[in-house]
Image (cartoon, rainbow, N blue to C red):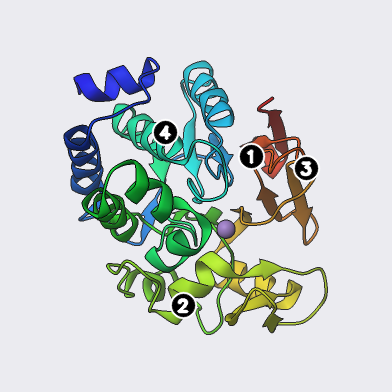
Amino acid sequence: MELVRSILEGKTKLAKDEIWNLSGMLQDHYRASPNVIDIATDNVIFVGDLHGELQCTRAVQQYIKKYNKHHFVFLGDYADRGPEQIETFNLVMALTLANPKRVIMLRGNHESDDIAVKYGFYNIVTKTYSFDVFKHYSRVFEVLPIAVYKHASLFACHGGVPEDISSIAEIQGRNRRHPNFLDDVLFQRVWNDPKENDFMFRPNSRSSRARFFGKSAFTKFMKNINAHVMFRAHEVFPQGYQTFFDNKLVSVFSATAGTKVQPKVVRLCKDYTIDPLDLI
Ligand SMILES: [Mn+2]
């Protein structure tokens, strides 16, 4: 845990064997975890896409200190695109390992070999270290859980509602242990986007395997699993968050994406209202 502490205190340049250690501890932490993690509290702060922005991740670290009675759920997309991808990924792992009871690290669509090869993480890791080191990260992709759930309260995942799923048990039964999203349900769970109309599902221009889910699909899913509010990430909004479906779905984005976004995390408050917190 000395390594974890040094990362929390600002160490950013890790040796190969330190990445092997850190990613190994994270794999041990999540290997036996179910796809959907039960969360025992409503006091949760949700963190959206970070995409290699270390400054925003450091700001989240400060909130974890400040809100020390809250759980924190990272909704995925730690690397690709931004300036400090390796450092950001390592810091999120360190924050999870340092606070194993109240910090949860979920898998986004970028926690996948295919996507990491296309959007930068593979290149930066193999250039800075080696292919072996990329495989350490890839093994982390495989073990990260997909969603969190609290009965009669909340559900959270990176993308949103997939087709043909009506229970938590059906999500639990899927196999996530692959560097890519072979399973269509898990793929849609991390790729789908909400759209404000009364329909079930429509094609999504992001991918032939992705869908838009409308209010009908959302309402039906939330009724089936008995949840009031859903949190997700995956989409850029200039204010850092956006609500859908009568405020029952909250989308959060925690990076600047250059200068496009005022990055936020979102705290769930009493009566399912929300408190968006600035990261910059
Ligand atoms: Mn995404």
The residue wearing badge 4 is: 87
Q: What kind of element bears circle 2?
A: helix
Q: Residue at x 62, y 56 (%)?
A: 234
- In front: label 4 or label 2: 4
Which quarter of the picture shows residue 19? top left
Locate the C terminus by quadrant: top right
Q: Which mark is residue 255?
A: 1
Q: Residue at x 64, y 78 (%)?
A: 211
- Residue type, mark 1 in image: Ala
Q: What kind of element bears circle 3?
A: loop
Observer-nearest residue: 32 or 84? 84
Q: Earlier in the sequence, mark 2 or mark 1?
A: 2
Q: Earlier in the sequence, mark 3 or mark 1?
A: 1
Sort mark 1 into few (<14), some (14-19) or many (20+) by Cα contacts within 10 Å. many
In the rendered view, does 31 fall on the left or right side of 37?
A: left
Q: Earlier in the sequence, mark 1 or mark 4?
A: 4
- Determine the CA span between mark 1 and mark 4: 14 Å
Q: Earlier in the sequence, mark 3 or mark 4?
A: 4
- Determine the CA span between mark 3 and mark 2: 31 Å
The residue wearing badge 2 is: 185
Q: Residue at x 55, y 63 (%)?
A: 226
Q: Position of residue 156 (x, y in %)?
A: 53, 54
Is the residue 102 above or below the residue 120 in the image? Answer: above
- Residue type, mark 2 in image: Val
**Residue 225 visible in this rendered orientation of the protein:** no
The residue wearing badge 3 is: 260
